[in-house]
């Protein structure tokens, strides 16, 4: 029967272990590079939404403004996501010495 030969032909036609596609970066992503998850980015960067794609953005340092999520659900709606604070820092309300309503900014502060 011809079917056996066909099966072998089919298997034979498949290329051997193909190299990674050209668009898959072998090195870790630098700031501004497209990514799928934070592990795609270099140390000190995270993968965050930017418009409708995701790019590597720097992890926040002490004193930088951060996003505090009151409701878990709002995270997906952001067009510009920020990274989380760096290791050892927490996103806290900035204690302003100005008017009480001073643009309630959250910044990365030491625990």
Image (cartoon, rainbow, N blue to C red):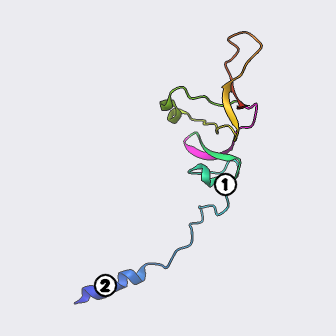
- Tell me if residue 42 comes above or below residue 94 in the rendering: below
Q: Residue at x 67, y 54 (%)?
A: 29
Residue farthest along the left direction in this orientation: 1
- Tell me if residue 57 comes above or below residue 104 in the rendering: below
CB under 8 Å between callouts 1 and 2? no
Q: How many marks?
A: 2
Residue 109 in picture, x, y percent from top left: 72, 30
Q: What segment is highlighted magenta in the picture?
A: 52-64
Residue 12: image quadrant is: bottom left
Q: Residue at x 57, y 35 (%)?
A: 79
Asked if residue 70 is among those painted magenta in the image, a careful observer would answer no
Task: Specify few, some or many for label 1: CA neighbours under 10 Å numbering under 14, 14-19, or 20 or more.
Answer: many
Asked if residue 55 is among those painted magenta in the image, a careful observer would answer yes
Residue 40's tag is: none
Residue 36 in picture, x, y percent from top left: 56, 51
Residue 63: image quadrant is: top right
Q: Please identify the quadrant where the N terminus is shown.
A: bottom left
Residue farthest along the front direction in this orientation: 111
Task: Specify few, some or many for label 2: CA neighbours under 10 Å numbering under 14, 14-19, or 20 or more.
Answer: few
Task: Give the mark nearer the N terminus: 1 vs 2.
Answer: 2
Q: Secondary structure at mark 2?
A: helix
Q: Residue at x 60, y 36 (%)?
A: 81
Q: Secondary structure at mark 1?
A: loop
- How far apart marks 1 and 2 lie (CA) works out to 43 Å
Q: Which residue is mark 1?
A: 29
Residue farthest along the bottom direction in this orientation: 1
Q: Please identify the quadrant where the C terminus is shown.
A: top right
Which callout, 1 or 2, points to the residue nearer the camera? 1
- Tell me if residue 109 comes above or below residue 99 in the rendering: below
Residue 6's tag is: 2
Residue 103 in picture, x, y percent from top left: 68, 17
Q: Nearer the viewer, residue 59 or 7?
A: 59
């Amino acid at each position: 029967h011809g079917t056996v030969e066909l099966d072998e032909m089919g298997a034979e036609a498949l290329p051997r272990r193909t190299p990674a596609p050209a668009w898959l970066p072998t090195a870790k992503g630098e700031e501004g590079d497209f990514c799928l998850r934070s592990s795609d980015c270099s140390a000190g960067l995270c993968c965050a939404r930017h418009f409708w794609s995701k790019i590597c953005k720097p992890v926040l340092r002490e004193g930088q403004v951060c996003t505090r999520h009151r409701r878990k659900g709002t995270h997906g709606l952001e067009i510009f996501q920020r990274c989380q604070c760096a290791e050892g820092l927490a996103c806290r309300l900035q204690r302003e010495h100005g008017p009480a309503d001073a643009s309630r900014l959250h910044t990365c502060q030491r625990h």
